[in-house]
Amino acid sequence: MEMEPWDEEMDGLLRRSMAAEMPELSPNFERNLMISLDRTSKQREKYRRTLIVGYLLASATTCIVIMHGEGLSWSAIGALCVAPLALVAAVPALLRLSQTETHRALR
């Protein structure tokens, strides 16, 4: 089977790569990586809540303005805004409760 010119070039490149020494990481690579990740995760955590609250307020305000512009009453708008928040607050409690009940049933 005859090889195309680019196939021969690729074959040569692969052969040279396989013949070369295997690169190694520096001895303290993992320690340096963990320090870097820890530093960036602390910085990220610092702004995470602020961004989430900002997004929540912006999206809630937008939804309220749009719903009011469509003619919904303030009570309907309030119910539509509070219901998802109640669900978000209730889900972790329900999950904990179901895990407790499951754990009791397994005993």
Image (cartoon, rainbow, N blue to C red):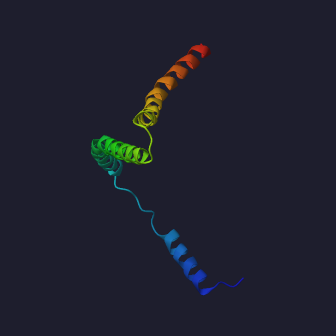
Vertically, is 20 above or below 29? Answer: below
Q: For residue 46, what is the image quadrant? A: top left
Tell me where residue 65 appears, x and y as whole percent.
37, 46
Tell me the quadrant of the picture where the C terminus can be found: top right
Above or below 60: residue 85: above
Q: Residue at x 54, y 74 (%)?
A: 15
Q: Quadrant of the N terminus?
A: bottom right
Q: How many marks?
A: 0
Q: Residue furthest right?
A: 1
Rendered position, 31 above or below 4:
above
x then y, percent, for residue 102: 58, 19
Q: Residue at x 34, y 47 (%)?
A: 58
Find residue 69 and report its horizontal and vertical position in percent.
41, 48
Residue 52, image quadrant: top left
Q: Is residue 32 left or right of residue 97?
A: left
* Residue in the foreground of this view, choosing between 40 and 56: 56
The residue located at (58%, 77%) in the rendering is 11
Q: In the image shown, does 55 or 45 lie closer to the viewer?
A: 55
